Image: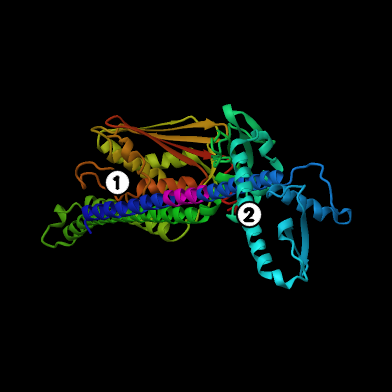
Amino acid sequence: MKQKYIILLAVFFFLAISGLVFIQFKWIDSVIRTEDQKFRFAVNEALKEVVNQMERAETYKRIMSKMRPESNMDFDNQDDAPSNQVMQMMLKRYGFNKGSRSEIIRRSKRPSLLAEQQTIAEHDNDTLYSRTMEVQTGTSSRIAGKIISIENIVSQLIREAPPLRERIDPEEINSTLKKSLDAVGIHLSYEYAVRGDYNTILYRTENFSTMTESSMYMRQLFPNDPIPGNNVLLIYFPEENAYKVKHIAFMAASSMFIALLLLVLATSTFIVIFRQKKLSEIKNDFINNMTHELKTPISTISLASQMLGDNNIPESSKDVTGLANIINEESTRLRFHVEKVLHAAIFESTHMIIRKEESDLHQIILRAVEIFSLQVTGRGGTLSTHLDASDPVVYLDEANFLNALLNLLDNALKYSIGTPEISISTSQASKGIILTVSDNGIGISKENLKRIFDRFYRVPTGNTHNIKGFGLGLSFVKKIVEEHQGTIHVESQLNKGTRITIFLPKNNRHEKGNHSPC
């Protein structure tokens, strides 16, 4: 698949994921708003019920206080004082004068109150009709009197409004609040206060504060007063926010987790796709380079062999020694390339076997210089050494470390500008030895410097085949250095050269992970 199609697919995929995340955020915001509205509605309904109950209770108390005032009254019958007291109050309220005669009669244990003109002679059957009419007339007058009495009481209630402090009972308010909130499903601790005219707080709970960060709810007290005052019941819930979050926390967290998981998975998937695409391009480049690198020595060896075996060429004209040297050099070159490929395969499949022995680092460096000196001098360059380490003995796998050093020298030679100038130096550190290889090559940009240790990666040079290589050298060097518990660091400037610094610790006798000594 072409890269532009992969990019286009990634753009559409991320747009879809972004839309999903946006919708999830909007849904969570909608749920939060809904929960907030439900909570506010429930609180307002509870406060409405509290205010109504307070007003009903106050009206009942005031009516009862008007109908049963505390006063000294005469009892006609001391044996039935409570009943007579109630009846005397009723007489007074409903227009029956104390001086007029009245009589309480009982039928089926139910008392009836009759005025003097309503008294019925139990044994006078001849006047039954007249007595009935008298009773009906007395009932009508009593109903009329009751209506007038109630109207008088209501008129007094309307005209008279006690001070707010006398109309509230904090304990009763608290009890009613708790019952009303429980009825609407709110089981939270709360703080409340009663505020009168001029914003005067008449009562507040111990922890009530007007500076709270929680939402403050309020309801007017006694709203049915003829002249409503500025009396307000204030309440807030310190745990309101936690209560709302608790109701949606699981769904919101689960939704966001899934959305973010999809985003991470999508990102990871496309990162892998792009890496695989890049790796595929690098491997194709590697195969092309490998084909070119292997064809050249094979062709040279084949041509030299044909010349040696050609009978048409006189023996005196054959440069047997020269042709043998060519075959030997190209065979060595071919073996070197094959070893690189084998090393790459080893890195891919198994752990490299390192056999460390006490070795003189300077001797290994001199062997590498000897191998490369002819190639450097052949280009008119110099390969200098500055071996200043006072104690060059460390535990090394000589064969693998020599190959790593040869890879560094090969890169320095290939990427040098004009006449190569390569320098190898050592210095003593407190806990090991520092090895430095520097050149005057083309240098490496900062963008490419981050990837030079990747397998098959080659720094772009314009023409793929103008500088030979597989992109395996530095990855092999890094692997060898790490197997010796060392570190490698690269510094480079374009068109000025590259400096590679390797640190090898002295106490690296054991393998990684504290394996047994070799």
Residue 172 is drawn in which quadrant?
A: top right
Closest to the observer, 218 or 87: 87
Residue that extends furthest to the top in the rendered view of this protein: 198
Amino acid identity at mark 2? Ser
Q: Earlier in the sequence, mark 1 or mark 2?
A: 2
Is residue 513 toward the left or the right of residue 469 in the image?
Answer: right
Residue that extends furthest to the bottom in the rendered view of this protein: 125
Residue drawn at x 29%, y 29% as measured from the top left: 496
Amino acid identity at mark 1? Arg
Residue 32 belongs to the span the image colors magenta:
yes
Q: Position of residue 138 (x, y in %)?
A: 66, 58
> Of helix, strand and loop, which one carries label 2?
helix
Vertical arrangement, residue 393 with respect to residue 256, above or below: above
| Tag 2 residue | 141
Query: Would residue 306 be seen by someone viewing this image from the given angle?
Result: yes
Give the position of the N terminus as an image quadrant: bottom left
Q: Position of residue 107 (x, y in %)?
A: 76, 68
Q: Colour scheme in the image? A: rainbow
| Tag 1 residue | 458
Vertical arrangement, residue 118 with respect to residue 67, above or below: below
Is residue 451 toward the left or the right of residue 133 in the image?
Answer: left
Q: Position of residue 450 (x, y in %)?
A: 36, 41
Q: Position of residue 382 (x, y in %)?
A: 31, 32
Query: Would residue 205 be seen by someone viewing this image from the given angle?
Result: no
Q: Which residues are magenta?
A: 29-40
Residue that extends furthest to the right in the rendered view of this protein: 79
Closest to the observer, 335 or 456: 456
